[in-house]
Amino acid sequence: MNVLSKVLFTSVLLLNTNVIFASDNNKEDNAETSNVQIDDVKVSVVGTWSMLSQYKQFERPFWSETITENSNGAVIADVKGFNEMGLKGSEVVRLMKSGVIDFGSTVLGYLAADNPKNEAIDLAGLSPNIETAKIVSDAYKNELSELYNKTYDIKLLGLWPYSAQVLFCNVPITGLSDLKGKKIRTSNRTLAEFVGALGGVGVTMSFGEVVQSLQKGVVDCAITGSMSGYSAKWHEVTTHLYTLPLGWANVMHAVSNKAWNKLPKATKNYIEQEINGLESGIWKGAALETEQGIACNTGHGECQSGEPANLILVEYTERESKLLDNILSDHVLPLWAERCGKPCVNKWNETIGKAVGKEIETK
């Protein structure tokens, strides 16, 4: 069993166990909620990228079906992906703050310009597997909750990942050393810093611009989730898939305090416990989608999401995992610490650092 298979097998096994317990708890909670009167309410919801599997398989069914069925028709939601509404990811929280949107999701990296704390749980190389990503997310959840309440006047309800962020390239690649001199699309600053440490050039662009940029040679490679890339047909414009997990593109899901404060207590309790179940399901789904994304993009393994592509599979070694960890310690963490400041770094050390056995030196 190769390095990636071992990581995925362990991750899926652990998350399956956690989700079983979460599902059992949800069933008990739903049984209790069914005895509580929930007032009729209609809410507006903005989800993530509507063409990707996370929205199609989790967010949209949850808000358009599950939340209504489990409340016996009391809670009805109008849900659309932010791209369907012509929005940028960072605009979602601003519209929640103004009360235009009730519930919304966006990728934390899209909010990094507002505050570096939004990068804290997904610094490049921090979480080499999904169980570590979950530990990191849980450790920092309260800090993000306070930040969002203060900055955007919203209540954080959930944090979850996409599938592992990996490299799609339209030039031959055998490992990290081949990134030197390459132009690589990154979705956030920390990934760009990782690429820069290897001698590459990070190019920040939106997800929707990537296919055309790969076709025209604007970039040589691009980083995204293994299944996200398959769903967006990146395999049609690339030749190689390098499977080292560089990050998880975490998503936050929140509700406007203006909308939340108007809801009765029983409705709030119901929605929170249902979203807890959604969160658990997406964590499980991300582990499975990482494996499926690799299978579907390369034809190595069974693809259950469509016709498999034939990208050249480039698997990583233990040596490259250690190199990634060294880049995290020597480049990514110090650069992030500079822009986040000493109090922020101290809080990171007390939460995430303590949870994963790392510490950033403060100056």
Image (cartoon, rainbow, N blue to C red):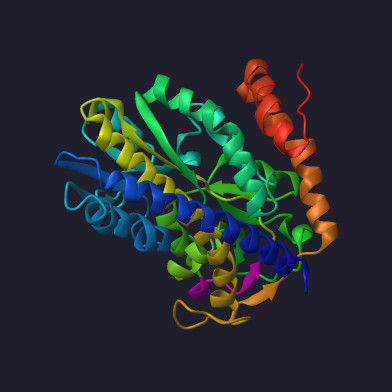
Whether residue 207 is situated above or below residue 329 in the rendered picture: below
Picture coordinates of residue 165, whole percent (x, y): 59, 56
Picture coordinates of residue 345, whole percent (x, y): 67, 23
Residue 296 picture quarter: bottom right
Whether residue 3 is situated above or below residue 42 in the rendered picture: below
Residue 44 picture quarter: top left
Name the quadrant of the C terminus. Answer: top right
**Highlighted range, magenta:** 235-242
Left or right for 285, reference 157? right
Q: Count the marks: how many? A: 0
Whether residue 262 is situated above or below residue 244 in the rendered picture: above
- Residue pictured at 50% horizontal, 29% vertical: 144
Along the line of sight, the residue nearer the viewer: 137 or 233? 137
Q: Is residue 234 visible?
A: yes
Picture coordinates of residue 203, whole percent (x, y): 56, 48
- Residue pictured at 73% horizontal, 39% vertical: 356
Name the quadrant of the N terminus. Answer: bottom right
Left or right for 108, reference 137? left
Picture coordinates of residue 109, whole percent (x, y): 50, 40
Residue 11 picture quarter: bottom right
Along the line of sight, the residue nearer the viewer: 110 or 245? 245
Outermost residue on the left side: it is: 40
Q: Is residue 192 visible?
A: no
- Residue pictured at 21% horizontal, 48% vertical: 77
Along the line of sight, the residue nearer the viewer: 218 or 38? 38
Left or right for 299, reference 112? right
Is 81 colored magenta in this rendering? no
